[in-house]
Amino acid sequence: MGFNRLCLLTAPSLDSLRRQGKTPKNLVVKNGRNLGKGSSKRDPFPDNQDLKPVNGQGQCERRVEVLRNGQWGTMCDYSSNWDMKDAAVVCRQLGCGEALSGPRYAHFGGGTGPVLVRNVNCKGQESALKDCQSETYSLCHHYYDVSAVCSEFKMLRLTDGCSGQLQVFYNNSWGSVCANNMDKATADKICKELGCGSLKSDVKEELSKLDPDPKWLDNVRCRGHEASVWQCPSSPWGKNTCTRTEVAEFSCSETLDLRLVGGTNNCSGRVEIKYGDTWGTVCDDDWDMKDVKVVCRQLRCGEPVSAELEFGGGRGVSG
């Protein structure tokens, strides 16, 4: 019987991300106002701003950044002002549900550009960050960069790593993404965002492997200019006429012969490896946190959290 390993996407340091050749995953706040460099003036948050995700799968768990004169920079919290009220405004503006936490101290890695805004202070009822007060001050260390984690965190996966049925984690459960109106360009973008290279096959309609199987998304079709697949048009979440036989399935050019099964996302669960065409489990002989660290690194899942027996035994070959 295979044993279980737990690997969660945590908060690796900026140095560890650089050593692994990774870019910190960000939640960014875009605005078009010229902030005075070096100024410490108490000032409303810049107008004309929206939120978008970059370098990651979801848009509801990221570091906050702001755009000034075409350059992205971070928001920092030197005076311990950033709290759940500020995170609530970020989550509300993104359409990401309720705020779960408002991490400080570069929880998702510090930024590499300038610090453009610090000490945002929201009352919690604002519809957008532009309605909150902040200091337009750039002399703040990235150690104090702020983040937001929201309840409607979303994540994509293919059931066999870089091939298989397309599923999405939404509303605290995995569900299917249907193939209606999905073209090759959209599937190719998904392959790239999953770190799986480019699209290798056609997009097919197949019978769902999930039970129960909420059909979270349908009619996903990117227009070509989106920064992330989450910005691509689709039917509203959970509102479609998709059936169990219309689930999107395709293959990407790269292979991923390692996966975690039985957890809440693709960064937690039982370790399984693929040998030939067969998936099997990994036994516990001499397994320790050093081994778990390698698994987390290969799956692009950050630093290891634990190696516990939590996800049940597998059904395939045990090696």
Image: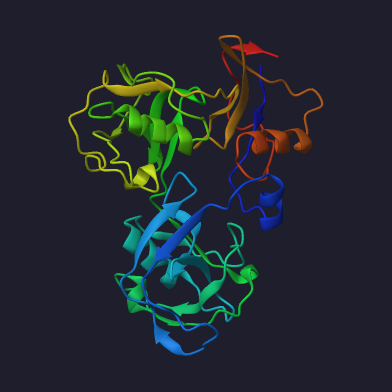
Q: Residue furthest front?
A: 69
Q: Please identify the residue farthest to the left as the structure is shown.
A: 241
Q: Is residue 86 visible?
A: yes
State the residue lying farthest toward the bottom.
41
Q: Is residue 136 above or below residue 25?
A: below
Report whether 42 appears left or right of 268. Answer: left
Query: Measuring 41% from the left and 34% from the top, which residue is drawn there?
Result: 190
Instruction: In this rendered view, identify the residue nearer to me: 78 or 153.
Output: 78
Q: Does residue 157 appear to the left or right of 248 in the view shown?
A: right
Q: Quadrant of residue 78?
A: bottom right
**Front position in the image: 194 or 199:** 199
The answer to whether residue 60 of the structure is visible from this angle is no
Residue 303: percent from left, percent from top: 67, 45
Q: Is residue 87 left or right of residue 276?
A: left
Residue at 62 percent across and 69 percent down: it is 142
Q: Quadrant of the C terminus?
A: top right
Q: Is residue 14 above or below residue 208?
A: below
The quadrant holding residue 299 is top right
At horizontal 31% and vertical 73% (from top left) the residue drawn is: 125
* Total residue callouts: 0
Way the structure is coloured: rainbow
Q: Percent x, y for residue 208?
A: 34, 20
Q: Is residue 240 above or below residue 199?
A: below
Q: Position of residue 241 (x, y in %)?
A: 17, 30
Q: Position of residue 64 (x, y in %)?
A: 48, 64
Please state, as top left, top right, bottom left or bottom right, where the N terminus lies in the image: top right
Q: Nearer the viewer, residue 131 or 101?
A: 131
